[in-house]
Every structure is written in C-alpha cells, then in structure tokens.
Image (cartoon, rainbow, N blue to C red):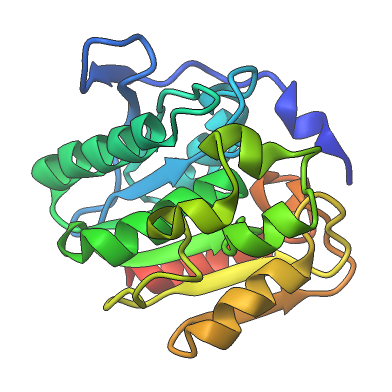
Amino acid sequence: MNGSILTRSAPEPPRTVAVGDDPDQVLELWPDGDAGRPLVALVHGGFWRPRFDRAHLRPMAAALNALGLPVASVEYRRRPGHPDAAVADVLAGLRAAHAHAGPVVAVGHSAGGHLVLHAAAVEPSLLRATVPLAPVADLALADADDLGDGAVRAFLGTAADDRPDLDPAAGPSPSGPVTIVHGDADDRVPLSVSRSYAGRHPSARLVELAGCDHFALVDPLSPAWTTVTREILAAAA
C-alpha cells in the first residue's frame, strides 16, 4: 500500500457548511445514515501542512456513509507556526457537528489523530468516542525523532517541549473511550509514537496491525479497512 489515496478521485460531498470566515473553516457532510447512528467526524492528516487537505478522506467518508453512518469531514487552517488556529478550527468543527447530531465519534488520521486526541482531552463533552488512526500522539517524541522532516517544529513554531498544552501524551487522559489503530509497517509515524501515548494513558486501547502502513488505515481498498471499520462501528454502537 502506498499514498495513492492522496490522489484518488471521489465524489464531492452532498453538503458543505461553513463554521468560520476562512475558506478552510468548513465541514463536509454526508448526512444520511441509519436512524440512531452517531455522526462520525473525520479529521485529516498531512503533518498539519497547507498542501494536504480534506479531499483525500472523501473515499473514506463515502465508504463509512455507505455503512449507514452519517459523516462529517472537518477542515482546519494549516498555517506553519500557528498551531492554535488548527486546534481552534477542529474544536469549532466538532462543536458544529455536536450541535447538529449530539456527541460524535471523532476519527483522526496522522496529524488529525493528534488533533482529535487533544480535543478529547480538553472538551470531552463533544465526543462519544475517539478513534485515532496512526496518530502523532506524542509531539515531544515526534519532534525528537524529526518526523516529517521537522513537521512538529514547523507546526508549533517552536520545540514541542515549549507547548506541552498541545501534546496529547503530556496532557490529561480523555474521559471517554479511546481506541488507537496503528500499523507496524508505518514509516511516516512509527508505531512507537502510539505505544508511547498508550504507555502514559493506559485507559487508551491500542490495536496494532501487522504489515500495515500509514495510508492503509484511511483506504477503503486496503486489507486494514476491515479492522478500521470494525473499530469505528464499535465506537458508534
């Protein structure tokens, strides 16, 4: 499996809703789902960098919607050195999703996994459960290992140790259920990052997938998709 999901075409969402004045402050909505199912809010990755946006999660959103889940995909401002904008936008998107459908299941991939873990810790009332996929869950470790060619430092505008308030590993444990899914063949965000988070937050459950790379977790055509959907559906049950 490779990064082909980043460029794979997919249908436009049925609806897009603004949650702020910036073009990046929006929710994409796939609103129809089975009665009583909670909304699944997706937060994309890309190491918080401007060139990666929500479009590459559209195949995932459509596939989850086909399983009977209403889906929202949260976009956020990706401005190097201005991490609080991204954090604020994800919280605003989750608040809008909560206002629309009640507590949501937050699913974040990579940098999006970092953002949903942070949201789960600081505003747990928004979330029914959190399912991070290959998350950058320990900013200090990711910074020390120079993941993404300095992605953490570029995002924060400083060393991770200077912003422990934005590091899920250093913060309080979320009060709601957290299930992390991570592959042991991930060369973008190594499994050791999720293991570090889980070691500091033992209430989190870590599902390790053998032979699974970084992008397989958000690819409906990958062998990992069965496990990903099982965990999301369990969180939504």
The quarter of the image holding the C terminus is: bottom left
Residue occupying the far bottom of the picture:
202
Is residue 110 shown above or below 176?
Answer: above
Is residue 111 shown above or below 142?
Answer: above
Residue 199, given in percent of the width and then of the height, sits at 59, 86
In the displayed structure image, the side of residue 95 where residue 8 appears, left or right: right
Residue 118, given in percent of the width and then of the height, sits at 38, 57
Residue 201, given in percent of the width and then of the height, sits at 47, 83
Is residue 212 shown above or below 41?
Answer: below
Q: Quadrant of residue 75?
A: top left
In the displayed structure image, the side of residue 81 where residue 196 appears, left or right: right
Is residue 63 shown above or below 123?
Answer: above
- The residue lying toward the viewer, choosing from 50 and 109, is 50
- The residue lying toward the viewer, choosing from 230 and 134, is 134
- The residue lying toward the viewer, choosing from 82 and 1, is 82
Q: Quadrant of residue 236?
A: bottom left
Residue at 30%, 11% (x, y): give it: 22
Residue at 32%, 55% (x, y): give it: 119
Residue 31, given in percent of the width and then of the height, sits at 28, 35
Residue at 55%, 33% (x, y): give it: 157
Can residue 101 be seen at all in this image of the molecule?
A: yes
In the displayed structure image, the side of residue 126 where residue 72 appears, left or right: right
In the displayed structure image, the side of residue 20 where residue 1 appears, left or right: right
Can residue 67 be seen at all in this image of the molecule?
A: no
